[in-house]
Image (tube, rainbow, N blue to C red):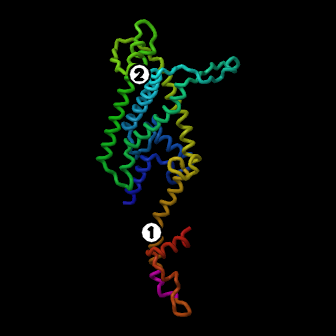
Amino acid sequence: MEEEEATNRLKRRLAARAYHFPGNTWCQDWMQYLSNTHTVLGLFFHHPLHPMRFQERLVILIGSIAIGLTISNLTYLYFIRNGFAVEEEVFTLNRHHTEYTGIPVVSITTLMITLWTLGSFLHTCFDLGLWHMKACTICRYQGRIDERTVQWGRVVGLFIVMISIFSGGYAVLLRAGIEYKGEGSVAEEVQESIMGNEVYHVKFEDPRSFKFLLGYLVEFVLALFVYYPLAVTVLFSGVLGFGRFPILGGRPREMKKESQYELSKREPKILKAANIESEENINGVVGDDGSMDDYTTMNYWDDESRSRFDDGHII
């Protein structure tokens, strides 16, 4: 019974993306968190008892790629729709040192800043929401697992991913039509339909340029294997939440909660043993005036005595 309870609690904490597990060092906890929550690494290195299997993680990966394409390309189309300059330069990097370093000048545009801030935030919210929906984190609290709710969560998550794929694919085709400037270009037609709030009927024979996808691929790889580990390390350390607040409290907060959990498991056993001992000695300690000592007469199961026991006898 205790083993089954421990297994269910382990699965529940894995689904909730726990920062800490008993007996782990800082490095071990960091590695387990990364291997269990990373979109790509988690496909191959997740815990054997993790409720999120390979198939579910693959769906999340596809959904993450699809929503990334959707957000980036819909933002691009929004800029065109409202007459914002897509290539408007805000500032440049390495302008004064390119001739010495050989590194080309990097132009930072308004579109880039929008995608790196608002776009990244929306992408992160989508990924976390899809994760908890597919893992059905809420269904696993208090050790109860509603399998029917779990299945519904997975079906709804798959439906959302399919919508993201179709919307992202349509946005990619529209942008590819705008990006192509050669012979037979339909860029003006696509832009006119966007400006007029009309649905452009995509024709597969239309010439397109998908070179912009290479830039998205670079961004996606950097986000997964550079930015994500750095962000995880900051959250994991708990510096943002001073080790106290949910999510931001990181590993230090979960270590405190784990200590409280272990203490709550041992406390009833300690109280039971103390109660038995007090009953055995109830007639053993009598004062000079014939009265018995307070310690031997207290009942550790009533609220007042229990609080005295907790304060004075548990370290």
Estimate how packed mark 1 is, as few (under 14), some (14 to 19) or many (20 or more) residues with alpha carbons within 10 Å: few
State the quadrant of the C terminus: bottom right
**Amino acid type shown at disc 2:** Val
Q: Left or right: 158 with respect to 18?
A: left
Q: Secondary structure at mark 2?
A: helix
Distance (Cα) linking label 2 and label 1? 61 Å
Q: Which residue is mark 1?
A: 268
Residue topped by disc 2: 172
The residue at the point 49 percent across, 36 percent down is: 121
Residue 281 sits inside the magenta stretch: yes
Q: Residue at 52% of width from left, 36% of height from top? A: 228
Is 189 located above or below residue 38 in the figure? above
Of 283 and 230, nearer the camera is: 230
**Residue 195 locus on image (x, y percent):** 41, 19
Identify the amino acid type marked 1. Pro
Task: Tell which tag, 2 or 1, sits nearer the viewer.
Answer: 2
Q: Secondary structure at mark 1?
A: helix
The stretch of residues the image draws in magenta is 278-285
Q: Characterize the magenta stretch by its predominant secondary structure.
A: loop
